[in-house]
Image (cartoon, rainbow, N blue to C red):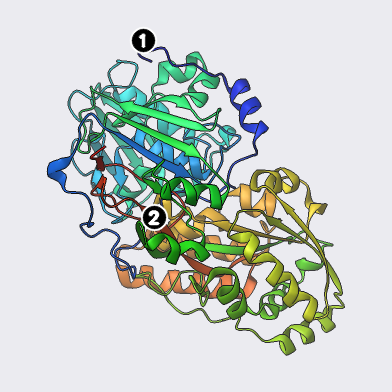
Amino acid sequence: MSSTNERMFTRRDFFKFSGAFGAAAGLAVAVSACAPADTNSSAGQASTGADASALNEDGTITAAISYELGTNGYDPMVTSAALTVAANWHTLEGLTEIDAATGETYAALASSMPTANGTTAEVQLREGAKFHDGTDVTAEDVVFSFQRVLDPANNSLYASFIPFITDVTAKDDRTVEFTLAHEVGVFADRLAVVKIVPKAAVEADPDAFSANPVGTGPYRMTENGANKTIRFERFDDYTGPRPARAAKMEWQIIPDPSTRTNALQSKTVQAIDSVPYLSIDQLKATDTVESVQGFGLLFAMFNNEAGNPFADVRNRQAFLYAIDMGKVIQTGLSDQATPATSFLHEEHPNYKRAANVYSFDQARARELFAETGLTKMRLLCTDHDWVRKCTPLIQESLVAAGIEVEFTEKKSADVYNTIDGVPGAYDVVIAPGDPSVFGTDPDLLMRWWYAADTWTDTRMHWKGTAEYEQLQTILAEGLEATDSATQEQKWGEAFDLISEAVPLYPLFHRKTPTAWDGTTLVDFKPISVTGLTFVGVGSTK
């Protein structure tokens, strides 16, 4: 790191301080998702806001973020908490990156957009790329970054996104060669899931790296949020395509929705994420507010462990039929969501209506529950502010269907700490999620939940079932398909299978409202899930 006087936290410090004010948003609540270009908002279009001619290149961007720090720190090999992933967007880079607002994939550390020639691909690093500690980025750093993600011993969630990469080698200091198991059309897009880190720094002190990451992005972190503020400053040696347009950024961590809203109205900050649905009209009087429809969802995850009542698919399906989703969305979310009719939301370019659609049907729910004899369940829910508007209504629907509900609400990280590797810990979990931060193709979105062991084995205990094995085959066939028609067919088969087995399934796909000061932020764009991105954004302040 540079010689500035910022405090350096170890991972032990990081956990101690972040634990004092709660754990982070849960895994898969990834920030700033890359919304498909066909969303029903103007995200990705030229934003209306402050005049670029008034840009202050020495200015500071201020924001309030709703999600708290994750327990895994900032290490991009393992973190998937909302806040840390958002911060990493600004401080770390992959060989490619995906624009959070438009979904566009562009060359970042790669000198040009990578392409695969059959089962091999060579990628050149951009000229003059440096890490924040002043060291040059080398091909060995790239190899190290991919190997640590692919190493099963590291249990990286991102390994499931790149199963087709079988080897990564350095041909020279600036050239990396990839060997692929088969041809794949999403090669360039998938490279974005692996952020390139300095081998020397990570190996020297992995805890220090996780607490204060060293990257190549347009900003470097100077304060890591342990005291509820994350600070960044412009990285002057950045050589990439999207340099910082402000000298500094300050993000306040404000989980409380009222406090976050007040911070914007008082001009303490210039932007906030996760606008409370009931505050949208209020904020429109003073600021710019926009809701973006995306993939981001609230899901029900069932305990498929043998002996649990939800190992019986009839109980899983009955649960979904029992919920009055129209009431949940209207009352809890002010109509800022759409009920799930498939794994994907209807605006997604690869959407296909699933074979099974769980419209509200309490008679059918009661019938299925009667067949299995289920009369009570344990419902474990996360406590995100907007989720808390929905879960009591979900409980109400289940009670109306004749089910006694033991309702427990915990912080997101506490939910997963409770259930991970403990098969008897729960019956049903309700939580938000959105892996579209890493890409929007259906294969990637499905692999997040239905291929990685963390979810299929450690959490939902679905791995090893006939349906699990069938889905892995379908996903592999879709990924290996060289024509779009076959790919679409396989994805459709997967949607149908998931809608029948429902080991984990969307309840709805939500719109995400963001609010910002359009008079001081230049080229700001809202995105489709919780989080904010200031890549390419400037300030007049």
Mark 1 is on which residue type?
A: Ser
User: Which residue of the protein is positioned furthest toward the top in this rendering?
Assistant: 3
Disc 2 secondary structure class:
strand
Please name whichever residue, 211 or 168, is drawn nearer the observer in this view of the structure. 211
Residue 31 in the image, given as x and y percentages of width and height:
45, 48
Q: Is residue 301 above or below residue 351?
A: above
Q: Which quarter of the figure has residue 319?
A: bottom right
Q: Amino acid at mark 2?
A: Ala
Q: Which residue appears farthest toward the bottom when viewing the image?
A: 363
Q: Is residue 532 visible?
A: no
> Quadrant location of residue 331?
bottom right
Q: Position of residue 133 (x, y in %)?
A: 34, 16
Q: Which residue is mark 1?
A: 3
Q: Which residue is mark 2?
A: 515
What percent of the width, then of the height, locates residue 194? 40, 38
Q: Earlier in the sequence, mark 1 or mark 2?
A: 1
Quadrant of the drawing holding the C terminus: top left
Q: Quadrant of residue 141?
A: top left
CB-based contact (under 8 Å), mark 1 and mark 2: no
